[in-house]
Image (spheres, rainbow, N blue to C red):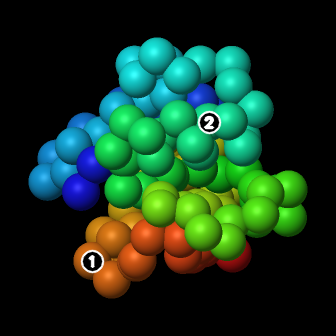
Amino acid sequence: MKILLDECIPRKLKYALPEHECQTVPEAGMANQKNGILLSLAENAGFDLFLTVDKGLQYEQNLAGRRIAILIVRARSNRLKDLLPHMQACRVIMNSIKPGQLARIGK
C-alpha cells in the first residue's frame, strides 16, 4: 500500500510501517497545501491511504467520491512515542480499508 503521512506526523513513523511504501507530505512535494488540494494531489500521485492525526479532517472535507482512504490516529499527541503504540491497529485497518473510506484509531 502506498501511504502518505500528513505534515503533522513525524517523518520517522514511516519506519514503523516497513511493509508499506510511505512518504511524508514534504517528501512527496506536497507541503503547505490545504487538505482538499492535498487529498487531490495524493490521489493523482497514486497514494492509497492518507495517515493523519487531524481530527477535523472528516468534518472539513467532503470525502464522497475520493479515491484515497483516510486513517485518523487519535493519540495523546503527534509525537512518535504516542503514535507508535497505535501502529498495530493501523495495520489491521490498512488490510481492509477501501478507497473513499475513513477510519479512526485510538480514543
> Which residue is located at x 37 percent, y 62 percent?
87
Q: Amino acid at mark 2?
A: Leu
Is residue 22 shown above or below 99? above
Q: Is residue 89 visible?
A: no
Is residue 103 shown above or below 63? below
Q: Quadrant of the N terminus?
A: bottom left
> Which residue is located at x 85 percent, y 56 percent?
60
> Which residue is located at x 43 percent, y 40 percent?
44
Seen as rendered, the residue at the extreme left is 19
Seen as rendered, the residue at the extreme bottom is 96
Determine whether the residue tagged by mark 2 lies in a helix, strand or loop.
Answer: helix
Q: Amino acid at mark 1?
A: Asn
Closer to the camera in the image, 46 or 60: 46
> Percent x, y for residue 48?
36, 56
Determine whether the residue tagged by mark 1 lies in a helix, strand or loop.
Answer: loop
- Disc number placed over residue 95 in the picture, else none: 1
> Percent x, y for residue 59?
85, 64
Closer to the camera in the image, 20 or 105: 20
Closer to the camera in the image, 46 or 26: 46
Residue on which disc 2 sits = 38
Q: How many marks?
A: 2
- Disc number placed over residue 72 in the picture, else none: none
Q: Is residue 59 visible?
A: yes
Is residue 105 shown above or below 13? below
